[in-house]
């Protein structure tokens, strides 16, 4: 059996844990900016931002992945990335470095989460590769659409 191919990824941290997303899906990394609340959105959707003329839904990955909430910090980053149905801004503690990883599929490990593509061992420890297509479920996406329609005036 051959090893899975290495992929380029962008690493980030949440509450000291290390994660990554495929770098080919990353549009841009931004410092934290003002986030406009989005009433009626799922709890892990903290609001929206305007990014290059488009409205982007901000997903708090701390909330999505079960990390404890904390106060906003000027050191927070937003990773703008293409998910399955829309481009989203992922709120993370800190985006770190691009890296190349060879993830073991999550199904082969003790990781049971719809949000995990795989896990890789790096020189700095374990890196959990996130599934961007699962960051918002279909129900989440529909709730976001309804909340965006109700938002007046648009951000």
Image (cartoon, rainbow, N blue to C red):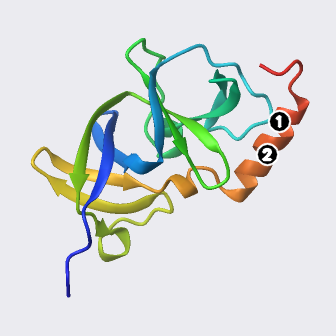
Q: Quick check: 133 above or below 5? A: above
Quarter of the image with the C terminus in it: top right
x then y, percent, for residue 89: 56, 34
User: In the image, 76: left or right of 108?
Assistant: right
Q: Residue at x 89, y 21 (%)?
A: 152
- Numbered marks: total: 2
x then y, percent, for residue 40: 80, 35
Q: Quick check: 151 above or below 112? A: above
Q: Quick check: 36 above or below 118? A: above
Residues at circles 1 and 2 in contact by the CB criterion of under 8 Å? yes
Residue on which the image places disc 1: 147
x then y, percent, for residue 76: 42, 21
**Label 2: few (<14), some (14–19) or many (≥20) C-alpha neighbours in 10 Å:** some
Q: Describe the element under mark 1 as helix, strand or loop.
A: helix
User: In the image, 101: left or right of 140?
Assistant: left
User: In the image, 144: left or right of 68?
Assistant: right
Q: Marks 1/2: CA distance?
A: 6 Å
Q: Residue at x 63, y 50 (%)?
A: 136
The one of 27 and 139 positioned closer to us in this rendering: 27
Q: Quick check: 61 above or below 25? A: above
Q: Describe the element under mark 2 as helix, strand or loop.
A: helix
Quarter of the image with the N terminus in it: bottom left
Q: Which mark is residue 72?
A: none
Q: Residue at x 22, y 52 (%)?
A: 100
User: In the image, 30: left or right of 49?
Assistant: left
The one of 68 and 120 positioned closer to us in this rendering: 120
* Residue lying at the far bottom of the rendered structure: 1
x then y, percent, for residue 9: 32, 48
Residue on which the image places disc 2: 143
């Amino acid at each position: 059996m051959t090893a899975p191919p290495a992929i380029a990824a962008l690493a980030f941290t949440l509450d000291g844990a290390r994660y990554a997303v495929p770098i080919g899906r990353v549009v841009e990394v931004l410092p934290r900016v003002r986030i406009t609340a989005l009433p009626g959105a799922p709890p892990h959707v903290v609001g929206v931002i305007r990014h290059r003329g488009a409205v982007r839904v901000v997903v708090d990955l701390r909330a999505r992945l079960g990390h404890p909430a904390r106060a906003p910090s000027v050191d927070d980053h937003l990773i703008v990335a293409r998910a399955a149905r829309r481009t989203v801004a992922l709120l993370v503690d800190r985006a770190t470095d691009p890296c190349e990883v060879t993830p073991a599929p999550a199904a082969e490990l003790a990781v049971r989460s719809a949000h995990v593509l795989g896990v890789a061992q790096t020189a700095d420890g374990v890196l959990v590769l996130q599934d961007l297509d699962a960051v918002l479920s279909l129900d989440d996406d529909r709730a976001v659409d309804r909340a965006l329609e109700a938002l007046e005036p648009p951000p």
